[in-house]
Amino acid sequence: MRSNLNRILESSRGIERINLDDHLLSERKIFLDGDIRSENCTDIIKALMLMDGQADKEITLYINSPGGDCESGLALYDAIRMTRSKVRAVCVGLCASMGAVIYLAADQREILPHSRIMIHDPSFGKADFSGQKSKEIEEHLAGLNKMRKTLATIIADRTGKTLEEIYKVTQYDSFYTAEEAVEFGLAHKIINKLI
């Protein structure tokens, strides 16, 4: 979430340099870019808590993410759902996997014309099961299936689809264009302006 981007502003006091992230946060705009990790989810949760305590005005979350850690993503999903302020999410580029689930937490979901959303079942990623006994692998699989049900239930609830419909489309990587995302219920509308 944090970067070293600076912006030059001209005001009655002259020219001043401000941190772009700080400026956007002051306007209640948050960016989630890249992999879903504990660090960036925690930063965003802190920002949501701060903003939610300051005012009851809309918060905008811009997302461009290929997905990542399910547990961290679910923590952010829950934080967004519990925020008293209305949260607007904008898909900027790609909301995939856990990035799509976080996107679904928002009260208002918007997507840019050439952006895409991808949903699928969770996976073990790059887990190495060499040397593990069959019982250990069964336990890992049971945990994966619990996560699958959790994520599919969220997607079904937020799109208005049945759990069976979601299981059918998430067994593979299912990509949706902006138009398809609106039609499926992942997004509410396509926008042509970021602000």
Image (cartoon, rainbow, N blue to C red):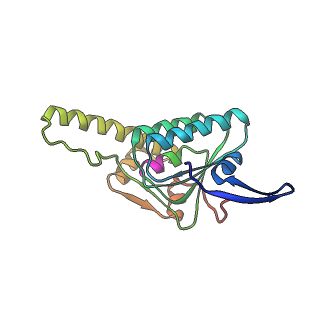
**In front here: 183 or 176?**
176
Secondary structure mostly taken by the magenta-highlighted segment of the chain: helix
- Give the x, y percent position of residue 106: 58, 45
Determine the residue located farthest toward the right in the rendered image: 12
**In front here: 80 or 157?**
80
- Give the x, y percent position of residue 195: 69, 58
In the rendered view, would you say 115 is above or below 158?
A: below
| Left or right for 173, reference 31 | left
- Give the x, y percent position of residue 143: 29, 35
In the rendered view, would you say 19 is above or below 10?
A: above
Q: Residue at x 57, y 67 (%)?
A: 113
Q: Is residue 96 magenta?
A: no
Part of the protein shown in magenta: 97-101
Q: Quadrant of residue 173?
A: bottom left
Determine the residue located farthest toward the bottom in the rendered image: 114
**In front here: 46 or 3?**
3
